[in-house]
């Protein structure tokens, strides 16, 4: 089935008008045929997945074509804004989802600045983009108006240049009366670590969203015109004041995020001996990159649209000793803690000025600093070990800390020039034949996605579990229990157990109970993304007192006039990660992919108070299995049968349970749910081949027959009807005698 049929089938299950107040529509855009239409999601989606990341996954599950490569234009790119985006303090965020060209998992990336709010206020909860434009296109949305502009004049332009050109050509100004999600030359060149820029620094970074947008020949989406908030009730505004007050009085926000931004995290990681350096061969680094070393270069702070925190440090190198600007990369926005480490210790640099320039270059080139920095550090380790030499690097000397080469390599990567073409293939360089297989041993990635977090997690076992089980790959923003390094909370076991819903050992390096911390974070972070809340002000990420389920439930009820309880929201968070796992299973990820890089199991930390720490394979396996159990996952790492069935009832509206012979690979419960509609036994067999790909050999057994509600089908399988809710069984029936 091709994408247009899938879109057609899905749209028949949607509504022509809003189902609740403030609901935005889903705009389906066929870029190849330059057509579009809108529909509204049913309320059951709101109550199962909310909006933003949650409903993005609902759409993706329905529109995904099994077996198709991520960059095929029939794989959709889906933008989503949260139900609270733009109306609650710090809820400036939205997600983009697809399947990832940069990893083996889902693509799901969050961004702030102005685009998600403009989308919501122009009446759209989701944009579903598919098909390849015949010519490069700039899509314009202004309320009901959707226009397809020729983007050829903008080709080759990077972030700053394309923004100025669009502002000039459309007589508008970003944030004031225009918001834009755009790709740079890196996205045009299908660089796997390229993101979609949503502002001077804001980026849908992870998973190769830029390459995915490039595969559609879509240079940008502009939302043009005023961006007015809906009318808000007195109660809603009162709640907002309370939320803002709590966020702004939280010490980490007041004293660190608002003043220096996320680089404040560099020092604690360094002091713990957990600062990933030189591709995690080392975990200690110089204090020359502590946040205060950037003070002189920070002219002020900026933030996402209407955010009262404003956590983004600006930079200006002309404020330093040399006092002059050489080019446009000497000032900019950032860095975040992630960029600081990836462009610092990870590649052997320790000068703040060098980190700032690289940060500014990355922002302009639209590259995900986490994946790009990790790809370079991986290459540097391979070079150090002699696994690759100058014949592979095209003469580039990849010695640690070789600044001129690193700066040059970023530009080469965006253009896919020389060795830049290898870095552009990111974590897939072995699969694409650029490195020998032995290189995989040194790749710091999970599910094919390089680690986002600077923090080497051999010490903190909760962090390590989170990175292993995160649905988009090795990324801390999905579930990191940051409060594991909060001594006050660790010393209050009753409070800690209440926070996480189970006993969690106070020692950061213990394995005991860490499954509860990860589970609790995973759920609330998913809900935060689904309503549009910034992670920094979502409970459990930086603080135990920032906005949580109670706040979200109250504001959702005010806006939508639908009832929500904190308990329901907890379940919704769980559902979101559940559907993400089901999508990953369709991408052939298994329980074996919920793991960590070999280095963390095999090599010990050599510095700091936790010297000697590594991950014990057995204890980690037990921890993972406890996490599966409390998460309702079966041993294959997907939602267990009853949960899968209830998710399918909402997602596809179809679910049949198929009982299998003992020992079928990929079906540890002895049965599976088939959730793609099938109408007869012949189609069921085809669906089983797709779903049970791990049991391909077992399914070939010609003695297997199917029973439908207890009745064996011995002939005419294509006439043996199956309907939603049927109980099916597959078992061997041996003839003869
Ligand atoms: S806290 Fe920072 S990242 Fe979050 S919404 Fe505000 S400015 Fe954006």
Image: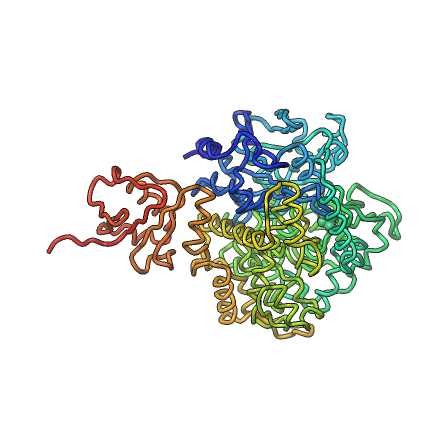
Residue 445 lies, in percent from the top left, at: 56, 57
Residue sticking out furthest to the left: 737
Q: Residue at 62% x, 41% y: name it.
A: 561
- In the image, residue 1 above or below residue 583: above
Give whichever of 691, 162 is nearer the camera.
Answer: 691
Residue 587 lies, in percent from the top left, at: 46, 48
Q: Residue at 40% x, 45% y: name it.
A: 675
Specify the quadrant of the image occupied by residue 37: top right
Q: Is residue 28 rendered to the left or right of residue 553? A: left
Number of numbered markers:
0
Q: Is residue 715 rendered to the left or right of residue 180? A: left
Residue 283 lies, in percent from the top left, at: 66, 66
The answer to whether any part of residue 379 appears in the image is: no
The answer to whether any part of residue 733 appears in the image is: yes
Give whichever of 327, 601 is nearer the camera.
Answer: 601
Q: How is the image coloured?
A: rainbow
Q: Residue at 32% x, 44% y: name it.
A: 684
Residue 100 lies, in percent from the top left, at: 54, 45
Quadrant of the rendering where the C terminus is positioned: bottom left
Give whichever of 357, 15 is nearer the camera.
Answer: 15
- In the image, residue 500 above or below residue 336: below
Give whichever of 73, 34 is nearer the camera.
Answer: 34
Quadrant of the rendering where the N terminus is positioned: top left
């Amino acid at each position: 089935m091709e994408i247009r049929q899938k879109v057609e089938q899905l749209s028949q299950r949607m509504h022509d008008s809003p189902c609740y107040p403030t609901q935005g529509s889903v705009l389906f855009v066929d870029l190849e045929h330059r057509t579009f239409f809108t529909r509204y999601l049913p309320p059951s989606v709101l109550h199962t997945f909310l909006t933003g990341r949650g409903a993005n996954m609902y759409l993706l599950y329905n529109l995904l074509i099994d077996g198709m490569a991520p960059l095929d234009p029939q794989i959709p790119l889906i933008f989503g804004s949260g139900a609270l985006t733009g109306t609650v303090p710090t809820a400036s965020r939205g997600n983009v989802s697809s399947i990832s060209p940069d990893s083996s998992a889902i693509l799901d990336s969050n961004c702030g600045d102005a685009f998600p709010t403009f989308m919501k206020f122009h009446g759209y909860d989701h944009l579903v983009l598919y098909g390849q434009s015949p010519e490069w296109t700039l899509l314009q949305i202004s309320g009901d108006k959707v226009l397809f502009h020729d983007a050829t004049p903008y080709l080759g332009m990077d972030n700053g240049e394309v923004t100025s050109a669009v502002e000039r050509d459309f007589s508008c100004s970003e944030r004031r009366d225009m918001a834009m999600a755009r790709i740079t030359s890196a996205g045009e060149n299908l660089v796997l670590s390229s993101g979609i820029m949503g502002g001077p620094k804001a980026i849908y970074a992870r998973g190769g969203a830029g390459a995915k947008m490039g595969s559609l020949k879509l240079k940008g989406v502009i939302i043009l015109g005023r961006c007015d908030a809906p009318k808000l009730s007195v109660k809603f505004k009162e709640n907002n004041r309370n939320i803002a007050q709590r966020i702004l009085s939280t010490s980490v926000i007041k004293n660190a995020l608002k003043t220096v931004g996320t680089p404040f995290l560099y020092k604690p990681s360094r002091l713990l001996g957990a600062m990933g350096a030189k591709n995690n061969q080392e975990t200690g680094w110089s204090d020359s990159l502590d946040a205060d070393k950037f003070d002189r270069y920070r002219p002020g702070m900026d933030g996402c649209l209407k955010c009262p925190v404003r956590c983004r440090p600006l930079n200006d190198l002309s404020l330093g000793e040399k006092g002059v600007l050489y080019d446009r990369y000497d000032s900019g926005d950032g860095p975040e803690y992630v960029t600081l480490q990836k462009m610092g210790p990870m590649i052997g640099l320790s000068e703040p000025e060098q980190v700032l320039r690289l940060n500014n270059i990355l922002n302009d080139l639209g590259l995900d600093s986490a994946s790009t920095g990790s790809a370079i550090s991986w290459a540097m380790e391979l070079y150090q070990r002699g696994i690759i030499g100058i014949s592979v690097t095209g003469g580039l000397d990849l010695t640690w800390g070789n600044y001129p080469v690193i700066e040059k390599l970023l530009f080469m990567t965006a253009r896919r020039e020389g060795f830049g073409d290898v870095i552009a293939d990111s974590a897939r360089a072995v699969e694409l034949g650029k490195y020998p297989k032995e290189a995989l041993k040194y790749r710091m990635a999970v599910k094919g996605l390089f680690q986002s977090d600077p923090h080497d997690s051999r010490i903190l076992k909760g962090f390590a579990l989170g990175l292993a089980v995160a649905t988009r790959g090795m990324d801390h923003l999905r579930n990191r229990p940051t409060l594991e390094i909060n001594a006050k909370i660790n010393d209050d076991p009753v409070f800690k157990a209440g926070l996480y819903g189970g006993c969690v050992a106070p020692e950061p390096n213990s394995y005991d109970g860490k499954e509860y911390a990860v589970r609790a974070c995973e759920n609330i972070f998913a809900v935060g993304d689904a309503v549009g809340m910034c992670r920094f002000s979502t409970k459990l990420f930086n603080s135990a007192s920032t906005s949580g389920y109670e706040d979200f439930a109250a504001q959702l009820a005010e806006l939508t006039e639908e009832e929500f309880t904190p308990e329901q929201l907890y379940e919704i968070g769980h559902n979101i990660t559940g559907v993400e796992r089901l999508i990953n299973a369709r991408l052939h990820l298994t329980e074996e992919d919920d793991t960590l890089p070999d280095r963390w199991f095999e090599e010990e930390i050599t510095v700091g108070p936790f010297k000697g720490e590594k991950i014990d394979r057995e204890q980690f396996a037990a921890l993972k299995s406890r996490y599966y159990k409390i998460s309702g996952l079966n041993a294959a790492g997907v939602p267990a049968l009853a949960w899968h069935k209830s998710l399918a009832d909402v997602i596809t509206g179809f679910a049949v349970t198929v009982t299998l012979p003992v020992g079928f690979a990929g079906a540890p419960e002895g049965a599976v749910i088939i959730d793609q509609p099938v109408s007869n036994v012949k189609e069921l067999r085809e669906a089983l081949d797709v779903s049970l790909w791990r049991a391909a050999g077992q399914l070939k057994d010609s003695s297997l027959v199917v029973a439908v509600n207890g009745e064996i089908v011995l002939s005419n399988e294509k006439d043996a009807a199956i309907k939603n809710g049927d109980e099916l069984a597959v078992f061997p029936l041996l003839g003869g005698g």
